[in-house]
Amino acid sequence: MTLLDISNLSLRIGTHKILKEVSLSVQAGEIVAITGESGSGKSLTAFTVMGLLPDTANTSGQITLSGTNLLSQSEAQMCGLRGHSIGMVFQEPMTALNPVKTIGDQVMETILIHKALPPDQARARARELLDRVGLPADRFPLGRFPHELSGGQRQRVVIAMAIALRPKLLIADEPTTALDVTTQAQILELLRDLVREFDMGLMIITHDLAVVADLADRIVVMRHGEVVETGTTQELLHNMQHPYTKMLFAASNHQVTLPEPPAPSPLLEIKGAVRDYPLPRKSLFAKPEYFRAVKDVSFTLYRGERLGLVGESGCGKSTLTRAILGLEPLQGGEISLDGMAITTTQNPEIRRRMQVVFQDPFGSFNPRHRVDRLITEPFYTLTDPPTGSARSDLIAETLRAVGLQPEDAQKYVHQFSGGQRQRIAIARALITRPELILFDEAVSALDVSVRAQILDLLAELCEAYGLSYLFISHDLSVVRTITDRCLVMQKGEIVEAAPTEEIFAEPKHPYTRALIAAAPQLPDLAQGAA
Amino acid sequence: KDSVTIGMQLEPPHLDPTSAAAGAIDQVLYSNVFEGLTRFMGDGSVVPGLAKSWEISADGLSYTFHLNQGVTFHDGTTMDAEDVKFSLDRARAEDSTNAQKALFADIASVDVVDPATVKVTLSKANGNMLFNLAWGDAVIVAPESIDDIKTAPVGTGAFKFSGWVQGDSISLEKNADYWGTPAVLDGATFKFISDPTAAFAAVMAEDLDAFSAFPAPENLPQFDADPRFQVLVGSTEGETILSTNNLKAPFDDIRVRQALAHAIDRQAIIDGAMFGYGTPIGSHFAPHHPAYVDLTGQSAYDPERAKALLAEAGLADGFKTTLHLPPPSYARRGGEIVAAQLAQVGIEAEIINVEWAQWLETVFRGKDFGLTIVSHTEPMDIGIYARPDYYFQYDNPEFQELMTSLNATTDPDQRMAMLKQAQETIANDYVNGYLFQMASLSVAKADLQGLWANAPTQAIDLTAVSWAD
Amino acid sequence: MIRYALKRGLSLVISLAVASLVIFFVIEIAPGDPASFMLGINAEPETVAALRTELGLDQSKLQRYLAWVGGLLSGDFGMSYTYRTPVAGMIADRLWVSLPLALYALALSTLIAFPAGIYAAARRGKAGDMAVMGATQLGVAVPNFWFAMILVLIFAINLRWFGAGGFAGWDKGFGAAIHSLTLPAIALALPQAAILARVMRSSLLDILGEDFMRTARAKGLTRRQALWRHGLRNAMIPVLTIIGLQFSFLLAGAIIIEQVFFLPGLGRLVFQAISSRDLIVVESVVMILVFAVITVNFLVDLAYALVDPRLRSRT
Amino acid sequence: MSRNLFLGCLLSSLVVLAALVSFVWTPFDHTAMDIPAKLQQPNGTHWLGTDHFGRDIFSMIMVGARTSIAVALVAVGIGMGLGVPLGLAAAANKGSWLDEIIMRANDLVFAFPSLVIAILITAIFGAGAINAIAAIGIFNIPVFARITRGAALSLWEREFILAARVSGKGAARISGEHILPNIANLLIVQGTIQFSLGILAEAGLSYVGLGAQPPTPSWGRMLADAQTMVSFAPHLALIPGSAIVITVLGLNLMGDGLRDWLDPKLRLAR
Ligand SMILES: Nc1ncnc2c1ncn2[C@@H]1O[C@H](COP(=O)(O)OP(=O)(O)OP(=O)(O)O)[C@@H](O)[C@H]1O
Ligand SMILES: Nc1ncnc2c1ncn2[C@@H]1O[C@H](COP(=O)(O)OP(=O)(O)OP(=O)(O)O)[C@@H](O)[C@H]1O
Ligand SMILES: [Mg+2]
Ligand SMILES: [Mg+2]
């Protein structure tokens, strides 16, 4: 018998139709991946199975778990099933745990709430579970609080909670999106092992096609609340039917061609940069201690060069960016742009020559200003900024350059999609024709298809304006296509620097190798997709 | 029931009647705990106290007091002539902190003749001496207990001080060894309730047996109608006046002061502020006194006359002044009405509500005011008009002379005539606006008897109080 | 934790030092003189001067400030100008009324607010929620002195269940004392309860939207179980802040209520002392109140650490 | 627009309307006494009856609205006018000595017992509307400074502020151009709440005799005057009491409604 069978599931929230006739199934011991762009209804499908929809939701269709119709269960019956027969793991490990309860209590709670074991045995069981997910007793006693664990460790606790009663079905909604590539690899490995070991069915939701390809037995592709295609991994990868699926995979593996960089002449020079953050004092009279976020970093970015910077979360990439922008002081070393030293005292000349694009497409804009005002903010650095028609011409030209319309100048950011917002951010960075642009995780928050468009845009702009940029990302596949040369950063230090292709072809530093190995790779689909 | 709980508005700051002006001290202690050589009775007469009798020399300069025998203080020590000498000398000493030091100003010396006899010699004759010695500020205290008098008063009275819960109450208990007629009650508690609403509620809820000087006259009809309670309405020594700064323009013009007097409708003030309790007065003198002359007609309510007088004084368009009002409701409410009445004749009086401390500083000592309303509660205090530096700054040598001769006169008929003349003089000069004589308003349980209805001085004399069976 | 406590202790000391300066000099510029207040209008000027000397008011301001602060440090608050008893004793007596009253009111307000807030949060948007929230809106809007007046009218004068005011005293027994504090405590507590219930509700609703509440439900907890086991403790942080603020308010802000119920509390003491210009009492009481507020804040901070382990690790 | 907001606006505008109309018209002169006609129950001539001096209560309530609104509004204005810049400055210099001093000073003001200070202020400068405003205003400063700093700090973390800094704008300019407009909603909502608290505070101060002085009518003083007469003329206390409740209720409902309407994610200090 099928473990989970969803047939013709439709979902309405208020007047909003969200799921349309969704059908899919999961067998025991099988890993089914649901993928698709943001907002396609992946999470809500999972919530429907769990019976955790908002009160205003309206469902039709059928969901059976080992023959029981879940949609006709009462709330009390669903409570009996949740945690017992169906376990769930969520995306955000940092907030998925109650901060005021110990991890032991939280894992035990699943067992106690279903009265599966008496308290003392439940405790022993919780211990076993934590051991099983890789949190050994000596380092992770039951009395630990969530804030004492890293993101990956917390995600393990959440998994331990979800599998405590060996549910028949485990649902994981983007379980690794918030984690590093290396941690992600470990968590995925753990999930795979657990499925094999307990013969569970796993429904994993992810937008990362590489993960999907790597892990899943079967793939379900969703768009706009509908299942557009489904099939076993091999079949689907090599024989995509639906154009949306094809587009999705193509975009994930999107490659751009950059123009040749000009002959090297130094633009940005960083020598022995050091950045310390003061730590809270240990005692009143103790010497203040420091956390060194950037340790003796030196490199040169040449005019016209596209330089990549990769490394795990927290390795100091953003800190370095802020130092280059002169937003925070250095504790050692120096940074200069075209021979001029960069300090935190505002030098308009340097400001004009350097711009930045951030990760969050919405947070980078003052929601109360119109686009024209937003993108002309860098004019503040100019001694005589253009006014009147010169100004509106420049705005129009810049907007066109990033693929928007001159009319968009009068709109507010909330009227744009995520990808369009990122275009506006690039327009703002371009408008003063800076010599250097810093991209800090500029495409990480975007859907794959949108990301592909932005990467294309960057390539075009390189062609048109001869851009130089520093492209910071933890996503190796993106860095690989959009940069000429690449730096690898670990714990505040640059451990390797080489032309991009060289790094990927023959990484020298062990950390670089680990990073590349951990990154899930889409199989080469060239022939399959054709 | 053999004890009473009596409400009063203010709490005594401390318990030494001889070193503070606070009426609350006398209310609790006068005649109950402390006694003087002479004392006031409920009708205002002065009778023998610790002195059973006295002789006055023909020139009026020497008083010989014969003390009661067998009088002991509450701590067991005897009260004799030494204690009298100590008390009077202390009150008039250089570094005395007696609030009414002027009462003793004419005493030249106090001599012990024998343990039961004291001779007081005056520097000049003073017809008021026996009256002066009846004040709470002149009570007899013992040198042994003087150091702790502020917290543990030791007197000779029919009640002993037994405890003080600060902010809440003071209790007294019967003095079994009292030298005179012993008290009927076994004990008494004075509870301090400053808020008028709270006072009403406490009496209504029968938390109290009586409330002396009930602060809200508007509630009295309700008590009167309630068979559980009796309302005692009597007289006080409080002349409530619209004090006027006689030196400050335009009040230095008698026509303006007269206009002021005619602009005021006393009855409206009594009805509005005191809900009908109080007697209109036309001069600074208590109506219950035998020498009283009714002069209210001379300053009858006549706004037209007032306007005419103002016009005569060149102030046809009126003028602006200030009206400082201390906290009691007679002043605050009365002030609002006065201001409204003055406005009718074109005088714009800006109301400034002040606390007593501020009133003393700015109005009384600083003399920085135009008008103010205050009740002068000291008995027989017309003499203040003879002090040109007194805050209303009335300077009339004729009147001052009159007072000097009054003090030197002992003949009752002559004194009577002089007092009448004094009343008329200040009424003719329109020194202040004379509003009304304050009524003494108390509420008690219907079966409580022997409380003073009048208030010749601020006292809650419990020596004759008892419960009807 | 110790480091944290030390740091807080230091800032407490600095705050108190600044506060003592501010208090002393603000109060000293008030016009009016305790000596002439006490001696009334018939006093002779030299009598007033004699009393000023006796009270030590003839010394310079700086001398008096130093003497006062020096006294405070050694636990001696000085002598009241008007009452002539040690200020420390007076304050202690009054605290025995004010402190129990504040605690009583706080307990009442918490007892009312918690169930009301939790009930409303659990029934968000339903009729029960609307009713509770409507009641709290009204509770916040009603001035407490007005409410007190109505309480006295109903319960003391008409029904005669309680005395109209006054404090029975602890020597009359715990029951009698508490009975006499009941009406004032209710008058103080209801408006506070309304505020607290609103905070409780909104704080719980915030928590209900947190990810870990979803995790809890995914484990099989019912809505109610999730609310009680996971929601409540997390929701306590803003609630604790409000409780701390309310306690400070109840201690110092009960003046009007103490007036209505003629309770011998701190508030009335300071009110009386201001009008009699008993400056040393005013200064000391204000100082005590500031100290109490700062201490309560400190305790609230420590209480945060109890409910929230994240703060505990700030060693 | 939610029901709360509607009801709140309705009640508040009613009160404001009464205050405004009172400038040009009241049924009677609010200061005119008619002692023989005192303590009348509501009737055809005096719609809400007369007080203990025979003044028309309806007129006094109308003019009293003016007093309450003026005092509370100016007090909140002072609190905002000083508190917001302080909060912005503290946030812009997070962790610096300036921030530390501003926040400590705030804590200190918070630590002072407000009513006692208000009484002291009036003891020093005399009772009156101006001093009531000052007393209420002072305690509004830290409220606004605190929420401004809190909200501004989270904005300073936002990327659009970084972008503005990259464009070379200074802290003051960023505070004015980017921070302030983005916390305006929050301030408006907190403003309405403080406004309602101000009205309550004014009533409390007037009740103990420290607010606006006669003959200017004030709701709190009307209550205080009425309190001894509740037992035989309850309307004297009920009417001003209800006026206070209606106004405060209206403002609170408006504040709540505005918060939901402007931004459901606003966090308010209360
Ligand atoms: N509580 C809700 N009320 C109304 N609409 C909702 C609700 N939750 C989600 N939606 C809408 O339902 C659609 C599907 O949401 P869902 O969260 O399932 O997307 P998703 O595929 O998981 O996207 P993502 O990859 O971003 O997590 C979206 O358009 C979303 O805006
Ligand atoms: N203001 C700060 N104070 C103290 N430590 C900080 C501060 N900002 C960053 N850090 C620490 O410095 C280190 C580097 O942070 P940074 O933000 O540069 O990392 P990152 O490489 O950009 O990571 P991510 O990929 O997550 O953005 C981290 O360990 C972080 O905790
Ligand atoms: Mg999702
Ligand atoms: Mg970063």
Image: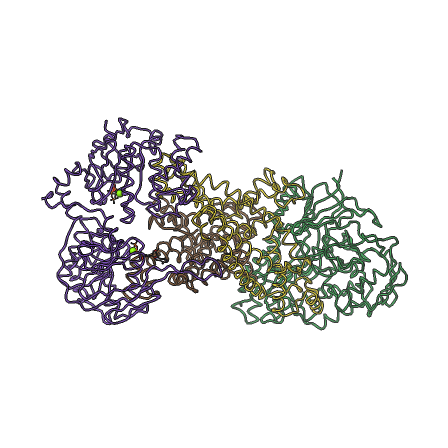
Chain colours: A purple, B green, C yellow, D brown
Taking A523 as reference, is C248 left or right? right
Residues A524 and D188: in front is: A524
Taking B341 as reference, is B127 left or right? right
Give the quarter the ligand 4 occupies: bottom left
Horizontal and vertical percent for residue C264?
63, 50
Say whether residue B261 is visible.
no
Residue at the extreme bottom of the image, as rendered: B397
Residues A124 and D46: in front is: A124
Taking A213 as reference, is C147 left or right? right
Say whether residue A513 is visible.
yes
Residues A34 and A60: in front is: A34
Horizontal and vertical percent for residue A523?
16, 45
Where's the C terminus of chain B, which quadrant? top right
Q: How many circles with numbers are drawn on the protein?
A: 0
Horizontal and vertical percent for residue A314?
32, 54
When asked about the image quadrant of residue D76, the answer is bottom left
Taking C60 as reference, is D87 left or right? left
Residue at the extreme right of the image, as rendered: B114
Where's the N terminus of chain B, which quadrant? top right
Horizontal and vertical percent for residue A50?
30, 35
